[in-house]
Image (cartoon, grey):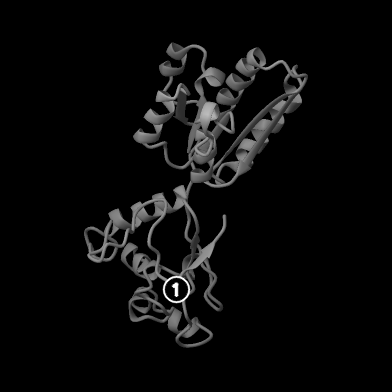
């Protein structure tokens, strides 16, 4: 996950910031406290952030420790709203006039970094900022199939089968391709032709970007036509927002 913060709040000494390629979230937040105290004269320092949901609990725990231990009265907030929304708020995209590109928040985080275009756009508007990796996480695919156990006796899927499920090319749990990978599944399913209901993220999601990039790269050797970046009909299949199959279920998260 990438941590980003505005230059005038997060790094007074660029040479120091550039010396380290990896920052812990604690280091980044302590830098915020040290610099916000200089530019803000309120009795309680309020430092707000937003971004990807994945490291939310980690960030909350670190913020709680800081609020308990800092000598200056400090209040941190972080909203897990998704990487795209976090970047949108950090850029102040919908601000105009004298407030154009003034960030809503002091910091944020995302599974994917800012694009070069947005990075240059913010810098050209006088809002220089830094982004740095600060924690590692994972994106998982999970299922809930009645009668099918987890663990070693559970479901096994190849990247090609997984991609076909998310493209609605495989629509039932007893599809021959799934059965060929799982000898036990036909006998453990509680009904035949049990439909697969695919739930996926809605709106712009860095998790979607990472997962769809995985589906593309992992299928290139054995089934390259299953998950191209763009289909022959122009459907986009890799990115924060893609053209999902109509049968998939959009979910907030």
Residue at the image point whose x is 55% and y is 78% from the top: 147
Q: Secondary structure at mark 1?
A: loop
Residue 248 at x, y percent in the picture: 46, 69
Looking at the picture, tell me which residue is in the foreground, 5 or 150: 5
Residue 24 visible to the viewer = no
Looking at the picture, tell me which residue is in the foreground, 100 or 191: 100
Placement of the C terminus among the 4 image quadrants? bottom right
Residue 200 at x, y percent in the picture: 48, 62
Residue 125 at x, y percent in the picture: 44, 25
Residue at the image point whose x is 34% and y is 74% from the top: 169
Image-based side of 134 in relation to 209, left or right:
right
Considering every residue shown, the one lying at the far bottom of the view is 192
Residue at the image point whose x is 74% and y is 18% from the top: 72
Residue at the image point whose x is 53% and y is 67% from the top: 150
Residue 122 at x, y percent in the picture: 44, 28
Task: Name the residue beneath numbered marker 1.
Answer: 247
Looking at the picture, tell me which residue is in the foreground, 98 or 17: 98
């Amino acid at each position: 996950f990438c941590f980003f913060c505005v230059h005038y709040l997060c790094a007074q000494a660029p040479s120091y910031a550039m010396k380290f390629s990896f920052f812990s979230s604690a280091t980044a937040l302590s830098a915020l406290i040290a610099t916000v105290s200089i530019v803000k004269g309120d009795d309680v320092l309020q430092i707000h952030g937003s971004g990807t949901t994945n490291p939310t609990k980690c960030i909350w725990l670190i913020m709680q420790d800081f609020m308990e231990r800092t000598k200056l009265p400090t209040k941190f907030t972080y909203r897990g709203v998704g990487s795209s929304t976090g970047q949108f708020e950090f850029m102040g995209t919908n601000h105009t006039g004298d407030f154009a590109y003034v960030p809503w928040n002091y910091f944020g985080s995302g599974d994917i970094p800012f694009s070069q275009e947005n990075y240059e756009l913010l810098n050209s508007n006088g809002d220089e900022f830094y982004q740095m990796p600060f924690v590692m996480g994972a994106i998982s695919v999970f299922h809930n199939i009645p009668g099918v156990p987890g663990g070693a006796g559970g479901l096994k899927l190849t990247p090609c089968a997984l991609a076909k499920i998310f493209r609605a090319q495989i629509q039932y749990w007893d599809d021959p391709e799934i059965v060929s990978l799982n000898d036990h599944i036909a006998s453990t399913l509680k009904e035949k032709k049990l439909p697969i209901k695919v739930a996926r993220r809605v709106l712009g999601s860095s998790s979607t970007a990472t997962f769809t990039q995985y589906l593309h790269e992992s299928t290139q050797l054995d089934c390259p036509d299953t998950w191209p970046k763009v289909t022959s009909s122009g459907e986009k299949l890799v990115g924060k927002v893609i053209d999902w199959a109509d049968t998939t279920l959009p979910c907030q998260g």
